[in-house]
Amino acid sequence: MSVSEKMAKIAIDALEDKKGRDIKIIDIRNVTVIADYFILASGSNRNQVQTLADNVKESLGRAGYEARQTEGYQSAAWILMDYNDIIVHIFSEEDRLFYDLERIWQDGKEMAVEDFKEMAE
């Protein structure tokens, strides 16, 4: 398992643990050099969006990974967490629909969470 796959699995588990909605992973390795994977999730309200981000930060931190940068935590409409190899996007449901990263990054390979977890094991 590569470092980016391990990080992505930890982040996905952290999002699932706090009931993140519509979790998706986009493999962008063949599209850009900015990261290997985008991980997207939605929260139903501001508090849940922040809780999802807190749990990702804590889980990856315990594994020895620190975010290079985190943006949007205070507004909690779209929190972006840059871990170099992976970028975690946590949205309010409205902002996720508005920004539609799945469409913007459609050249990447969208993977089902279950399929990714099996591949990463």
Image (cartoon, grey):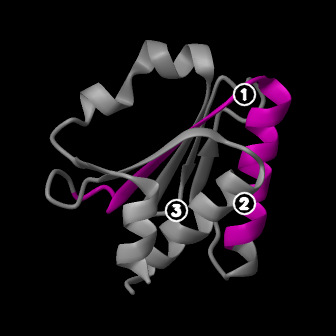
Q: Disc 1 residue type?
A: Ala
Q: Position of residue 86 (x, y in %)?
A: 44, 60
Q: Amino acid at mark 3?
A: Tyr
**Disc 2/disc 3 C-alpha distance (Å):** 10 Å
Give the class, few, some or many, for how many residues have Cα within 10 Å of label 1's Cα (few <14, many ≥20).
many
Residue 34 shown in magenta: yes
Question: How far, Cα to Cα, is label 3 from label 1?
Answer: 18 Å
Q: From what the image shows, is residue 41 above or below residue 91?
A: below
The span shown in magenta is 33-60
SS type, badge 3: loop
Q: Quadrant of the N terminus?
A: bottom left
Q: Which residue is mark 2?
A: 57
Q: Residues within 10 Å of mark 3 (few under 14, many from 20)?
A: many
54 and 40: which is toward the camera: 40
Residue that badge 1 annotates: 76
Residue 115 location (% of width, % of height): 37, 63
Residue that appears at 58% across and 13% down: 94
Mark 2 or mark 1, which has the lower sequence index? 2
Label 2 SS? helix
Could you tell me if the residues under marks 3 and 1 are in contact, i.e. CB atoms within 8 Å?
no
Q: Is residue 18 visible?
A: yes
